[in-house]
Amino acid sequence: MTLAETDDLAVKIIIYEDNADYGDALRILFSHEKDIELLSLFTNCSTVKEDIEALKPEVILMDIDMPGMNGIEAVRKIRQFNKVVDIIMVTIFDRDEHIFKALQAGATGYLLKTSSPDKIKESIKEVHNGGAPMSAGIARKVMSFFAGTGNTSAEADNLSIREKEVLGLLVKGYSYKMIAASLHISINTVSFHIKKIYEKLHVNSMSEAVAKAIQGNLLD
Amino acid sequence: MTLAETDDLAVKIIIYEDNADYGDALRILFSHEKDIELLSLFTNCSTVKEDIEALKPEVILMDIDMPGMNGIEAVRKIRQFNKVVDIIMVTIFDRDEHIFKALQAGATGYLLKTSSPDKIKESIKEVHNGGAPMSAGIARKVMSFFAGTGNTSAEADNLSIREKEVLGLLVKGYSYKMIAASLHISINTVSFHIKKIYEKLHVNSMSEAVAKAIQGNLLD
DNA sequence: TGGTCAACTACCTAAATTGGTAGTAGCAGG
DNA sequence: CCTGCTACTACCAATTTAGGTAGTTGACCA
């Protein structure tokens, strides 16, 4: 009974990993771990949908660099039919491009293959517990992404209340006429506000102003 | 000599925390930790610049909810003159708004006050080691931010090569005339391409198209 | 091989945007 | 109390954009 009980409590995982050596290492690692049950290990992603629907894993370890469908595409595909299974990316690269694409695709965690066996086991439990395990350097990159996202230009500060209001409507695709109606002012007045906005943002067309407003987080 | 040596190796930190009880708890926590040296604990942020320049801490624990200048504003102020010191936010709230504002301001980590003493000590070492410690739920929120950032609309896929090219120039603020010159085609042709783009994106003005292109990550 | 379709090219007119000009109200400093 | 400054309102002429129409080319398929 004790065995059955631990099986019930164990986190059920599957692995996608084309490298035989690393795959074997993981297999051995989890064979000694009563809290984690490795349901299956696949060397390619051609049957992800069938695999997941048949085995119903709670956590997936996904290698990024695989022949055929790579790990990021696989995540994208999985998310089309399953939003809840936790997916931890495992890779030898910490290239920014990979990281952000994987996260955008819907990955829940991101580990480097240099991670210790303990870190991997701990990460599986952590992700299953509502966390988002990341290797230290990865986490730092993710955080750095946010720094600088905010409005630093100080250009927004110079915009008056009314101007910010108008800019907000421009970004929403309103025309002069629609803005005039929305704010109960003449279209000529709208024109003037927009002119001042262009001056302050150093642009001279609606599209430039909109691009700058969005990219520079000029609105709240 | 042993004592001096550990002092050299210890991570030097300062704390901003207005709650006396929690502050005392931290003070006691670190007094028993040889790897961490608490240089000072402040109950408000009015003198952050002076504090940091005088004490030269390696890590700062910053409470978010403080009277006067709050923790997020304090981080923003610190980053104006110091880009390297690691700052870990500590708060009782896990409100999304706080999290993202703190990260944008330049925080390096984000812990909840419910974190165990061990987690706090570990986090200080982790951040000092190039990581970005976060409470589990926080990390998950940060990750979730990215999911959905990517282009899911599939609208971009329908754009032809030429149309993406034109849209890219629109986003850069080019006028029809400039695009025509840039692509060596007639302005009428540019007009046609843009018309098709509007159709495919379901918009009917330049600003809407630009907004959608940027917000929906339609370009690479 | 003829038909269909998507992509790219181009012109034209009506409507919208840009940039110049100007008046009024409110507020801070001398 | 007046001056200067900023925000907000408004009009008009010149330019630009939006939407309608159409010809050419190349790819795919029956």
Image (cartoon, coloured by chain):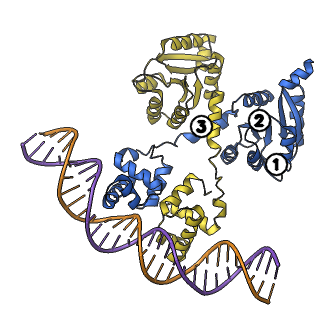
Chain colours: A yellow, B blue, C purple, D orange
Q: Position of residue B7 (x, y in %)?
A: 88, 25
CB-based contact (under 8 Å), mark 3 and mark 1: no
Between residue A44 and residue A13, name the one nearer to us.
Answer: A44
Between residue B112 and residue A162, name the one nearer to us.
Answer: A162
Q: Quadrant of residue A47?
A: top left
Can residue B14 be seen here? The reply is yes
Is residue A140 rendered to the left or right of residue B47? left
Residue depicted at 88% across the width and 35% down the height? B39
Type of residue at label 2? Thr
Can residue A1 be seen here? The reply is no
Residue picked out by circle 1: B66
Dot 2 falls on a residue whose secondary structure is: loop
C-alpha gap between disc 2 and disc 3: 21 Å
Earlier in the chain: of badge 2 and badge 3, it is: 2
Dot 3 falls on a residue whose secondary structure is: helix
C-alpha gap between disc 3 and disc 1: 27 Å
| Viewer-nearest of discs 2 and 3 | 3
Q: Position of residue B197 (x, y in %)?
A: 37, 54
Residue picked out by circle 2: B114
Residue depicted at 89% across the width and 33% down the height? B27
Q: Give the vertical position of B32 relative to B196 (above or below).
A: above
The disc placed on residue B143 is 3
